[in-house]
Image (tube, grey):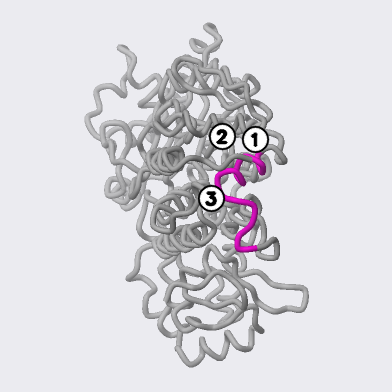
Amino acid sequence: MKPLSPTAIEEIRSGICDAVPKGTSEHGGTLERKFLYLPPRHSQALSPDNPLVVGIRGAGKSVWWAALQSPKHRDLIARALPKSDISRASLVTPGFGETEQPELYPDKRTLRALLKQGYSAVNIWRTVVAYHTWGKLADSSLKTCGSWAERTQWIEEHPEQTAKAFAGYEKLQRSTRNIHLILFDAIDRTADAWEDLRHLLRGLLQLLLEFRSFQGIRAKAFVRPDMLDDSAVVSFRDASKITANSVELRWDRADLYSLFWQRLANTKGGQEFRKLCKIAGVEQWAQVEETWQIPKVLQVNEDVQRNVFHELAGQWMGTDRRRGFPYTWLPSHLADAADQVSPRSFLAALRTAAEQSNVRGGNKALHYEAIKKGVQAASTIRVEEVSEDFYWVPTLMEPLRALVIPCSFDEIRDRWQKGQVETAIRKQLGTANGLSPKRLDLGLEGLCQDMLSLALFSEMRDRRINMPDVYRVGFGLGRRGGVKPIS
C-alpha cells in the first residue's frame, strides 16, 4: 500500500497526543462526549438494575460515575446501549466520589468522625441516600438538619419515619416510571485506615442489598476487586445476593482498540486517520452531532482492526515477524496476571509511542521501538498506582530489582529474607495509609499469596513465579528477550 505522507504522519501523531492529554486524570471529571466509547459488554455495568460494578484501577469506573450524572451523556449511553435501561434514570446524584463535595456527601474526615461517634456505616450511607431523595422535599424533617452528623443522628433515631419516607418517595418515582440513581465511587478514598474502610465498604454493600428491591430508588457502587477480598467485608446476611451478581468492568482487545479509534477519529488528526482506514478497507464513517461514529466492522472485526493498526504501526515489532505483531503485542504486554488491561494504561502507552515516534522518524505513525517505550511509560504509571493503593508492595519489590523472571519462589524468598521485608512491613502497620497485606501472619509465603491475588504475580505450571510486563518493567525486573526494565 501507498505509504503515508510526512504531513499525514505528523497529523496522526499529533492527533494521538490530543486524544490522550498528558498527565491528566479523568477521575471526577466528565469526559467529552466525542471521546466516549461504549463497549456493548458494559451495558450491564451501567444498568440501574445492577448495583455492584467491579473493575481494576483504570478500568473506567470514575468515567462512568461522572458520565451517568450528565443528562447529555446519559442520553448518548441510552441510545448506544438500549439494553442498559439507563433511559429511566431521570435523576442521578453522587453518593460519594474522589472529588470532595461536602454539600453532596460526607468527606473522609467527616466519615471518620461519624464512625468514632458510634454511627453505623450502613446508616451513614442510608443518610446520604435519604438526603438526595426525600430529604430535599419541602415537608422533610431531614431538611432542617444542618450537618451530616445531625442528619445521621435523625436517621438512627427515627427508623420508622425513615422507612415511611423512603416508601413514599419510592411510590412517587414508580408512579412516573422514573428511577433516582445514587452513585458511589472511589470507595478507597473514604478512609485512610483499612479498619474504617472495611466498615464503610461493608455498610455500603448492605445499603446496596437494601435498595435492591426498590424500583424507583437505586444505588450503584463502583469498587475495585481486591477490596472485596476480605471475609469481614461480606460477613452479613445475604451478602452473596450482591457480590455473586456483581458486574465486571472488563475491556477485551477489540474494545481497547475501539476506544482508541473513537478518540483519534475525533481529533484534529482524525481526517488523516479516517483516510488511512479507507486504505485499509473501512469506508463508512458517519458523523452524528459533530461526533464521528466508529463503523461497526471496525469495532467487532479483529482482522479489520489489525489491518488498520498495522497501517499505523507497521507489520512487525522489529525487522521481521519473529518479534511479534503490534496489534496483539501491545495489549498482551499491558495485561496483568489476570489478563486484564487498563484502558488508561493502553492509551498512555499509545501517547508515549506517538511522542517517541516523532524522535524515531520512519514512514509509519508509530515506530515499533516507540511502542516499547510506551509499555515502559504505562508500566511506570501502573507501578505508581499500585504503590499508592498498597504501601507494602514497593517494600516487597525493591529487593527483587534486577531479578530475572520467571524464577522459583525460593529465589524470591531468599531476597526477601535478606531484605528483611516482613519486619519492614510490620513496622509500617498502623502508620502507613492504605490497605495492609491480608496474609502477613502467614509469613513470606502469605505475602506471595497476596501478590498472586492482586494479579501482580502469576504461578506457572512448573510452580515458578512470573510477573506481567505491565508491573515487571516498572519495578525493574528482567526477562530474557523481554521489554527492558526501567533502571
> Which residue is denoted by mark 3 in the rendering?
342
* Mark closest to the chain's N terminus, 2 or 3: 2
Residue 119 visible in the displayed image:
yes
* Mark closest to the chain's N terminus, 1 or 3: 1
Q: Which of marks 1 and 3 is in front?
A: 1
Is 26 magenta? The answer is no
CB atoms at circles 2 and 1 under 8 Å apart? yes
Q: What residue lies at 60% left-to-right and 53% top-to-bottom?
A: 331
> Which residue is denoted by mark 2 in the rendering?
276
Hey, what amino acid is under mark 1? Ala
Hey, what amino acid is under mark 3? Ser
Q: What residue lies at 63% left-to-right and 19% top-to-bottom?
A: 82
Magenta residues?
305-319
Q: What residue lies at 35% left-to-right and 35% top-to-bottom?
A: 29
Foreground: 131 or 257? 257
Percent across and percent down for residue 399 are 46, 84
> Which residue is denoted by mark 1 in the rendering?
280
Neighbour tally class for label 3: few under 14, some 14-19, many 20 plus, Cα within 10 Å = many
Hey, what amino acid is under mark 2? Leu
User: In the rendered image, which quarter contains the C terminus?
Assistant: bottom left
SS of the residue at dot 3? Answer: loop
**Vertical arrangement, residue 400 with respect to residue 149, above or below:** below
Foreground: 361 or 305? 361
Q: How far apart are marks 2 and 3 (CA)?
A: 26 Å
| In this picture, residue 206 sits left or right of residue 324 | left
User: In the rendered image, which quarter contains the N terminus?
Assistant: top right
